Image (spheres, helix red, strand yellow):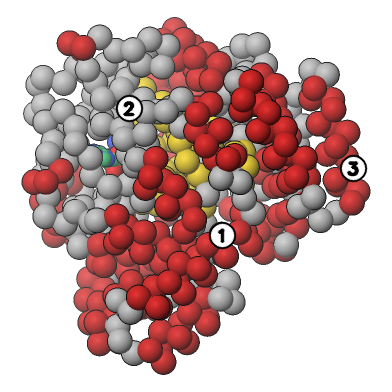
C-alpha cells in the first residue's frame, strides 16, 4: 500500500501508485481545464504532487508546454536569480564489485584500467582543480569495500580540505558513493561533507534488479532507503537522481517525485538537489542497447516538470550533455553545472595515457572552466563559486527556510558576486575578467538591501587588494 511516510522502499515508491498515476496522466493529458489548474497551482511556487507533475509531462498540447517552459524559467529566476553554481567531479577509484549493466566499472570488465588515487595523487589532482578556480567538488567512487573502504574516502576528504595552494581551496566536498550504513553516513557527516548524492538509477524495482544483476547494489530496498539512513546519520542535504534511458521516463518522474515527497513527509525536508543524467557511451557500454533513451525535447520537458514540482531543489546537469543541451536546460530550471570535468580516475593534473583509460563515460562538453564561465556570463548568468550555506550551518530545512523567506537575494546574490570576483582575480583570462567585471557591476543592483549592497561593494574592493573568503 502506498504510504509516503513508510520507511519501506516498496511502500513509499509503490509500483501500483505509479501505474495509477500514469493512467491518470494519460486520461487527463488533453484535459485543458485540469492542466490550466495544475499550471496555476505551480505558479504559486509551492510545488506539485507526483500526480500533477505527471499530467504535465504527459500533456502534448504545444501551447501548454510553452506555458510550462515559461513558468519553469520564471520560477528558476525567482528562486535562483541568474546564479549558476559551479562544481567538478573527482573520481577517486573505479574498483567495483557490482554488475551494473550500463556502467563500464562493472566487475566483469577486464579491459578498463582499474585505478585508485593515492593521497599524493589527490593532492596533485586537487591542486590542478584549484588552479582552474574550482571550490566545490563531487567525489565519485565505484563500490568496493576492500579497495575503496569508507576509511579511504574519509582520509581523502581530509586531504582535500587540507590542500591550500595559492589562493585556492576546496570549500565544499559533496560525495557520490554507493549506499552505505547509518554509521558510515555519520562518519561522512563528521568529515564535513556537503551533499550526499546517490542516483536511484531507476525506480522500477523489477528493472532495477535486472540492471544490477550482481553485487550489493542489486538490493533495491537497501539502495532506495539509503537517503533515510543518510538523514538518520545526520546528513541534512541529500541529492537524488535518475539515470534516464534505463526505464520509461514517465515512470521515473513519478518515482523521483514520490521519493522527494517521502523525504519531506518523514524528515521535514525534501532533496537538496536532483540530477538528471542520461546514459552515455563508455568503454564497453553502448547506450543504444537500452530501449528507453529520451530525445532532447523530452529531456527538456522532464527538466521543466521537475523545476515546477520542486521549486526549492537545486537541479544539476553534468558534462554528459553538450553545450547546446546545457544552454537549453539552463532556461528550464538547472541551477548547478560542472565544468572542465574528467570522468577518469586522475586526469586533471595530466591527461591519461591512451592505453590506460579509466573513464566512466564520454563527456560531451569539453570546454575549459574559463570557457564555461565566459559562456555563462555572456548569456547573463552569474557563475557562483559559493559554498557559504553549509559552512554557515544553513543545511536541510534551514536552507529551505532561507529560500522561502525571500532573503535569498540578500544572501546568495552577494556570495555569488564575491566568489565570482575571487575567480576573476585569481584564475580568469583577460576577456573573461572584462566580461565578469561588467556583469558584477550590473548584478549589484539586484541586491535588494542598500546596506548589504554597500558591504558587498566594500568587500569587492578588499578582494581586489588580496583578501579572500568573505561570505554572508
Ligand atoms: N558507484 C556509486 C553508486 O553505486 O551509486 C555512484 C558513483 S557513479 C561513479 C555515478 C553515477 O554515474 C552512477 O550513479 C550512474 O548513474 C552514472 N553512470 C554510470 N554509468 C553511466 C553511463 N554509461 N553513462 C552515464 N552515466 C553513467
Which mark's residue is nearer the viewer, 1 or 2?
Answer: 1
Which mark's residue is nearer the viewer, 2 or 3?
Answer: 3
Q: Give the vertical position of 198 relative to 190 (above or below).
A: below
Q: Give the vertical position of 68 relative to 293 (above or below).
A: below
Q: How crowded is mark 2: few (under 14 residues within 10 Å), some or many (20 or more)?
A: many
Query: What's the distance in space between the residues labelled 2 and 3, CA to CA?
Result: 42 Å
Q: Name the residue under label 3.
A: 454
Question: What residue appears at the point 57 percent right and 65 percent down from the top-left corner?
Answer: 74
Work out whether mark 2 precedes mark 3 in sequence or the reverse, and give the earlier one. 2
Q: Name the residue under label 2.
A: 343
Callout 1–callout 3 Cβ contact below 8 Å: no
- Looking at the picture, tell me which residue is in the foreground, 5 or 20: 20
Report the side of 83 relative to 336 (left or right): right
> In the image, residue 287 lies at what x, y percent?
15, 43
Question: What residue appears at the point 11 percent right and 26 percent down from the top-left corner?
Answer: 109
Report the side of 331 relative to 144 (left or right): right
Question: What residue appears at the point 59 percent right and 45 percent down from the top-left corner?
Answer: 381
The local secondary structure at tag 3 comes to helix
Query: What's the distance in space between the residues labelled 1 and 3, CA to CA?
Result: 26 Å
Distance from mark 2 CB to nearest ligand 1 atom below 8 Å:
yes
- Looking at the picture, tell me which residue is in the foreground, 108 or 358: 358
The local secondary structure at tag 2 comes to loop
Residue 76 circle label: 1
Work out whether mark 1 precedes mark 3 in sequence or the reverse, and give the earlier one. 1
- Residue 85's quadrant in the figure? top right
> In the image, residue 367 lies at what x, y percent?
42, 28
Amino acid at each position: 500500500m502506498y504510504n509516503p511516510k513508510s520507511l519501506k522502499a516498496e511502500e513509499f515508491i509503490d509500483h501500483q501508485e505509479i501505474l495509477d498515476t500514469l493512467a491518470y496522466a494519460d486520461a487527463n493529458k488533453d484535459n485543458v481545464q485540469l492542466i490550466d489548474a495544475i499550471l496555476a497551482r505551480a505558479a504559486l511556487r509551492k510545488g506539485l504532487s507526483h500526480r500533477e507533475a505527471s499530467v504535465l509531462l504527459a500533456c502534448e498540447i504545444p501551447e501548454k508546454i510553452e506555458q510550462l517552459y515559461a513558468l519553469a524559467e520564471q520560477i528558476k529566476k525567482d528562486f535562483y536569480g541568474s546564479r549558476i553554481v559551479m562544481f567538478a567531479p573527482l573520481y577517486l577509484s573505479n574498483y567495483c564489485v557490482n554488475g551494473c549493466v550500463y556502467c563500464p566499472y562493472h566487475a566483469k570488465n577486464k579491459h578498463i584500467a582499474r585505478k585508485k588515487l593515492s593521497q599524493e595523487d589527490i593532492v596533485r589532482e586537487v591542486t590542478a582543480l584549484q588552479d582552474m578556480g574550482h571550490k566545490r567538488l563531487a567525489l565519485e567512487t565505484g563500490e568496493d569495500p576492500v579497495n575503496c573502504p569508507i576509511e579511504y574516502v574519509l582520509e581523502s576528504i581530509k586531504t582535500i580540505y587540507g590542500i591550500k595552494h595559492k589562493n585556492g581551496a576546496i570549500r565544499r566536498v559533496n560525495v557520490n558513493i554507493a549506499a552505505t550504513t547509518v554509521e558510515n553516513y555519520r562518519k561522512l557527516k563528521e568529515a564535513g561533507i556537503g551533499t550526499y548524492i546517490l542516483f536511484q538509477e531507476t525506480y522500477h524495482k523489477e528493472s532495477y534488479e535486472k540492471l544490477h544483476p550482481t553485487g550489493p547494489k542489486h538490493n533495491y530496498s537497501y539502495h532506495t532507503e539509503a537517503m533515510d539512513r543518510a538523514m538518520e546519520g545526520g546528513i541534512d542535504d541529500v541529492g537524488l537522481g535518475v539515470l534516464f534511458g534505463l526505464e520509461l521516463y514517465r515512470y521515473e518522474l513519478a518515482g523521483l517525485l514520490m521519493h522527494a515527497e517521502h523525504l519531506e513527509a518523514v524528515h521535514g525536508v525534501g532533496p537538496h538537489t536532483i540530477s538528471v543524467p542520461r546514459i552515455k557511451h563508455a568503454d564497453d557500454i553502448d547506450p543504444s542497447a537500452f530501449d528507453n533513451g529520451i530525445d532532447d525535447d523530452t529531456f527538456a520537458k522532464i527538466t521543466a516538470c521537475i523545476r515546477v514540482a520542486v521549486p526549492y531543489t537545486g537541479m544539476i546537469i553534468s558534462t554528459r550533455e553538450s553545450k547546446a543541451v546545457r544552454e537549453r536546460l539552463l532556461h528550464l530550471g538547472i541551477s548547478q553545472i560542472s565544468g572542465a570535468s574528467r570522468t577518469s580516475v586522475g586526469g586533471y593534473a595530466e591527461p591519461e595515457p591512451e592505453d590506460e583509460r579509466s573513464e566512466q563515460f564520454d563527456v560531451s562538453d569539453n570546454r575549459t572552466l574559463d570557457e564555461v564561465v565566459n559562456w555563462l556570463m555572456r548569456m547573463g548568468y552569474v557563475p557562483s563559486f559559493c559554498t557559504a550555506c553549509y559552512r554557515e550551518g544553513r543545511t536541510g530545512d534551514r536552507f529551505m527556510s532561507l529560500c522561502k523567506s525571500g532573503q535569498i537575494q540578500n544572501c546568495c546574490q552577494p556570495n555569488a558576486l564575491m566568489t565570482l570576483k575571487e575567480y576573476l582575480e585569481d584564475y580568469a583570462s583577460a576577456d573573461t575578467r572584462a566580461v565578469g567585471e561588467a556583469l558584477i557591476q550590473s548584478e549589484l543592483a539586484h541586491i535588494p538591501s542598500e546596506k548589504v549592497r554597500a558591504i558587498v561593494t566594500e568587500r569587492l574592493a578588499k578582494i581586489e587588494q588580496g583578501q579572500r573568503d568573505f561570505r554572508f
